[in-house]
Image (cartoon, rainbow, N blue to C red):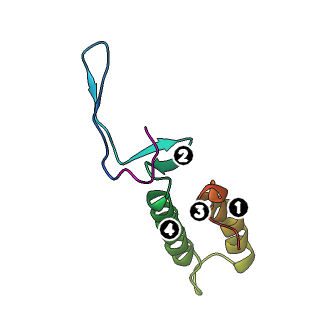
Amino acid sequence: MNCCRKSKSVGPSLILGTGSEVPATACHPFLGVLIDRQLRFHEQVARAYAKGSTWTAAIGRMARTRHGLSLPIVRRLYLAAAIPSMLYAVDTFITPL
């Protein structure tokens, strides 16, 4: 993948020595982080947002007031599973203030 902010095109596909062709894509997953050609991380941010929304909805369903989990268990679940899932590799795509 050639990373350049000025180039808007995806570029040509890669033809291997065996004759098979690898199509060019707009982003590439590397160690669980989606890296796009312009290093803007829009796809990674959207993916992290979707994970956060999924975890928030799931924990909200488990924490019903009448038959749900107790507040300390919900908090422990949120801190142990939801936050690490949402914020995986956050330092690559969030600019500190």
CA distance for labels 3 and 1 = 11 Å
Q: Is residue 20 left or right of residue 36?
A: left
Q: Horizontally, is 49 left or right of 94 in the view?
A: left
User: Which residue extends farthest bottom?
Assistant: 65
Query: Mark 4 is on which residue type?
Result: Tyr
Q: Please identify the dominant SS of the magenta region.
A: loop
Give SS at disc 1.
Answer: helix
CB-based contact (under 8 Å), mark 3 and mark 2: no
Residue drawn at (50%, 63%) of the image = 45
Q: Is 97 in the magenta?
A: no
Q: Which residue is mark 4?
A: 49
Q: Amino acid at mark 3?
A: Met
Q: Position of residue 13 (x, y in %)?
A: 28, 33
Question: Between disc 2 and disc 1, whose residue precedes?
Answer: 2
The quadrant in which the N terminus is found is top left
- The residue beneath circle 2 is 32
Q: Within 10 angstroms of label 2, few (less than 14), some, or many (20 or more) residues? A: few
Task: Point out the tag, 3 or 2, that comes first from the N-terminus.
Answer: 2
Residue type beneath disc 1: Ala
Q: Which labelled disc corresponds to residue 40?
A: none
- Please say if the residues under marks 2 and 1 sit with CB atoms less than 8 Å apart: no
Q: Which residue is mark 3?
A: 86
- Disc 1: CA contacts within 10 A as few (<14), some (14-19) or many (>=20): few
Q: Where does the magenta region start and end?
A: 1-7
**Residue designated by label 1:** 80
Mark 3 or mark 1, earlier in chain? 1
Question: Quadrant of the rendered structure where residue 76 is?
Answer: bottom right
